Image: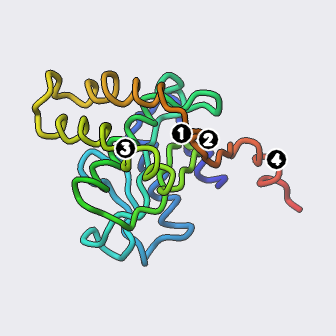
Amino acid sequence: LMHLMDQSNDTESEEFHKNLIADFLKKTYYDPNHSINTKGRNDLVIHNGKDAKTTVGVILEAKKPTNKAEMLRKDKLNTKAFQELVLYYLRERVTHKNLEIKYLIATNIYEWFVFDANVFEKCFAQNKKFVKQFEDFEAGSLVGKTTDFFYKDIAEPFIAAMDATIEFTHFDLREYDTALRNAD
């Protein structure tokens, strides 16, 4: 954890930080039993097995620490990072028929937002109207074809109108910095 936090660099790109997160996950738990890499447009995924042929179990969206506009906050989930997780979840769940997704995570190295895939299933994949909009978007039959169109014109208003509470776990590694560096 100390190495992960110490390697963060505000002047570096999102790609740089995504690689730090992948290295951290590999070195702390997942290697060699789980493949961690990109998949399509997903920043990172953790596969349920040793190679990329196995199903995706975890979808991660990584933002650089200085990208506050796109990163989730505890009091504001409806951000680009969350909308990206929704799109990536629907692609994995609806398009690829993956029933083995366990978690979705948004992180900026320090803050981690962890969502149980069951929450996304109930809130998004089981909503027939929303899934239909997603499928129409993926088929290219809507006026907009860019992912930004999906985020702004489909996901953002849908999330804003939701009645359901979206449960998540949040932690900030900076809160543990003193304890991590304590020689005792």
Which amino acid type corresponds to the residue marked 4 in the rendered image? Thr
Disc 3 marks a residue whose amino acid type is Asn
Residue at 61% over, 41% down: 111
Mark 1 to mark 2 CA distance (whole Å): 6 Å
Under circle 2, the secondary element is strand
Instruction: Please tell me the numbered disc located at residue 127.
Output: 3
Q: Which amino acid does label 1 sit on?
A: Asn
Disc 4 to disc 3: CB gap under 8 Å = no
Evaluate if marks 1 and 2 touch, with contact meaning CB atoms under 8 Å apart: yes
Percent across and percent down for residue 9 are: 53, 35
Numbered disc in front, either 1 or 3: 3
SS for dot 3: loop
Q: Mark 1 points at which residue?
A: 108
Q: Residue at x 41, y 72 (%)?
A: 34
Categorize mark 3 by other alpha carbons within 10 Å: few (<14), some (14-19), many (20+): few
Question: Which amino acid lies under the numbered mark 2 shown in the image of this protein?
Answer: Glu
Which label sits on residue 178?
4
Mark 4 to mark 3: distance in Å? 44 Å
Quarter where residue 145 is shown: top left
Secondary structure beneath label 4: helix
Distance in Å between CA atoms under marks 2 and 4: 16 Å
**24 shown above or below 129:** below
* CA separation in Å, label 3 and label 2: 29 Å
Query: Which of the two discs, 4 and 3, labels the residue nearer the N terminus?
Result: 3
Q: Identify residue for label 2.
A: 111
Query: Above or below — where is 173 with respect to 103?
Result: above
Left or right, residue 169 beside residue 21: right
